[in-house]
Amino acid sequence: MIMKTLQSILLLLCHVFQLRRCNQKSKEDSATWKDLLSAAIIKPISISLMLFTLQVLSGIDPVLFYTVDIFQAAGSTIDDYYSTIYVGIVQVVSFQNVQP
């Protein structure tokens, strides 16, 4: 019984020391606002914002919002709510095919 208690205490101490080491390392490797202005960050964010803007301007939002109504009005045999999932899958797959 005493042996298990000692093992538990040693294990707890090991975890505490590991957490302290990780905390110290994270303080050393912390990011600054200047890091956000690097090309490695600005380029992906710019591309993402451009794609988001193009998606909004293309008018896909109303199609996604009213997918259930569109499929009901068309008299489709597909379940109305699954149709939204299918449209989302098609959108993701078509986006994957566009990227180089």
Image: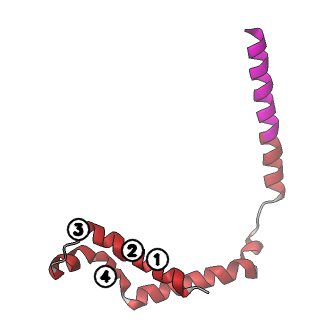
Q: Earlier in the sequence, mark 4 or mark 2?
A: 4
Q: Earlier in the sequence, mark 1 or mark 3?
A: 3
Tell me which secondary structure the magenta stretch mostly adopts.
helix
Place of residue 12 in the rendered image (x, y in percent of width and height, measured from the top left): 75, 28
Image mark for residue 79: 3
Q: Earlier in the sequence, mark 3 or mark 4?
A: 4
Highlighted range, magenta: 1-18
Q: Earlier in the sequence, mark 4 or mark 1?
A: 4
Quadrant in the picture for the C terminus: bottom right
Give the side of residue 64 with respect to residue 28, left or right: left
Residue ID for mark 2: 88
C-beta proximity under 8 Å, tags 1 and 2: yes
Q: CA distance from mark 4 to mark 1?
A: 15 Å
Residue at x 22% of width, y 77% of height: 71
Is residue 10 rendered magenta in the image?
Answer: yes
Q: Is residue 48 above or below residue 33?
A: below
